[in-house]
Image: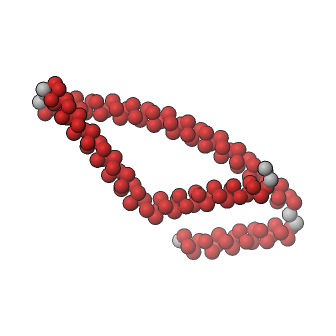
Amino acid sequence: MNNRQIYQKFIFHLSLLGITISALVGFYDEIFGHIFEALHLLFEVVEMALDKVIEHTFETGVHETQLIVFYILLVLLGILTFFLWKLLVRLFSGAGRRLHTEWTEFSGAISQDWQAMTMANRVILIAVFLLVNYLASFLLF
């Protein structure tokens, strides 16, 4: 893979990261509010369904039904947490390997290009980098 393709892939991933962070920062209340509300409604529906099923099946009182439903939901939550943990470990280990590979390619390309630059081009590149970051700081802070 040539350096141009490596830079394009890096800029694309950096742009996706920036868009994701901007969306989360700008709309975190809306996004997480809707997600948590939907999860809460799902929990309530499952709890009510279990209440009715257990109450009619075993002919128990309110307190006994609540205890049975609590322990069933506790077991389901434990199983869900276990599988979610396994999924996240697999996901992040694969992402970590890919990130390490891409970072190695990118740093090699940067190092190769930096060594090929003249001193004047290096100074110009550093000045442009500092100027862009200085101007971007007005938008962020």
Left or right, 61 with respect to 108, comes to: left
- The residue depicted at 22 percent of the width and 39 percent of the height is 48
Residue 67, visible in the rendered structure:
no
Residue 121 figure quarter: bottom right
Total marks in image: 0
Percent x, y of residue 61 = 11, 30
- Between 79 and 50, the residue placed more toward the observer is 50
Image location of residue 77, percent across then percent down: 35, 35
> Is residue 110 positioned above or below 44 on the image?
below
Identify the residue shown where x is 54% and y is 70%. 140
Q: Residue at x 44, y 32 (%)?
A: 82
Q: Residue at x 17, y 26 (%)?
A: 57
Does the image show residue 78? yes
- The residue closer to the viewer here, 24 or 41, is 41
| The residue positioned farthest toward the top in the image shown | 58
Q: Is residue 84 left or right of residue 34?
A: right
The chosen color scheme is secondary structure
Q: Quarter of the image holding residue 133?
A: bottom right
